[in-house]
Amino acid sequence: MASFTELVENSNHHPQEKINIETVNNIEITSSSSSAAAPAAPASSSSRYENQKRRDWNTFGQYLRNHRPPLTLSRCSGAHVLEFLRYLDQFGKTKVHTPMCPFYGHPNPPAPCPCPLKQAWGSLDALVGRLRAAYEENGGKPETNPFGARAVRLYLREVRDLQSKARGVSYEKKKKRKRPPPPPPPQQQLPLSSPPLSAKTAHYM
């Protein structure tokens, strides 16, 4: 799945607002002493998740710089996070049908329609999770984390519900089936009495 950074860089929707990640060096936020003193991990050892989180963090930082008026991260709120998420919809690739569309609620529409393309709920939910972690890793306090604001959680829930109805796709998590307990080991039962001797066997005794 293409990252948000790649989608933004490859888009020509708004060239005047095009985000250039290479121009971002850092974000205006007070870094903790522990993170400042820690040596940078080699790029080869960084996981895909860590690389994606860093790119998303830089993308959001550049978005704040291009904001009118420009914003610093310390002044960023949940409302600005919502603006960022709605801004990303222009780079989305998920067809979300409107209630007037004949394919509303159809998971596999048989023909094209003019309904808009948006970011899928799952992509937005994962993005917010990465940015929420990156905020605190870069010195932000959990109690002031704008990515964990109640308004952001409600927005993601609304997007999930709307897209599930429009696309006919259920986002409910499947409940794990409980494994049945193993059957008890069979108990060895002793015979109550010896079997009767046959007439042939009794003759030789």
Image: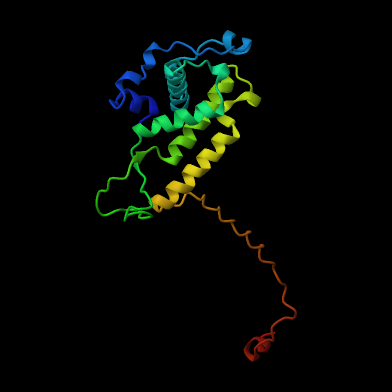
Q: Measured from the top left, where is residue 186 in percent x and y? A: 66, 66
The C terminus - image quarter: bottom right
Direction top: furthest residue: 37
| Lateral position of residue 183 relative to residue 108, left or right | right
Give the quadrant of residue 192. bottom right
Q: 201 or 97, which lies in front? A: 97
Q: 2 or 107, which lies in front? A: 107
Query: Which residue corresponds to the image point at 69% horizontal and 83% vertical from the top-left?
Result: 195
The N terminus - image quarter: top left
Up-down relation of residue 60 to residue 114 (above or below): above
Give the quadrant of residue 96. top left
| Lateral position of residue 56 relative to residue 139, left or right | left
Up-down relation of residue 170 to residue 91 (above or below): below
Q: Measured from the top left, where is residue 177 in percent x and y? A: 56, 56
Q: How many marks?
A: 0
Q: Measured from the top left, where is residue 162 in percent x and y? A: 45, 47
Query: Which residue corresponds to the image point at 65% horizontal and 88% vertical from the top-left?
Result: 198
| Lateral position of residue 44 relative to residue 177, left or right | left
| Lateral position of residue 196 relative to residue 122, left or right | right
Give the quadrant of residue 22. top left
Query: Which residue corresponds to the image point at 51% horizontal and 39% vertical from the top-left?
Result: 156
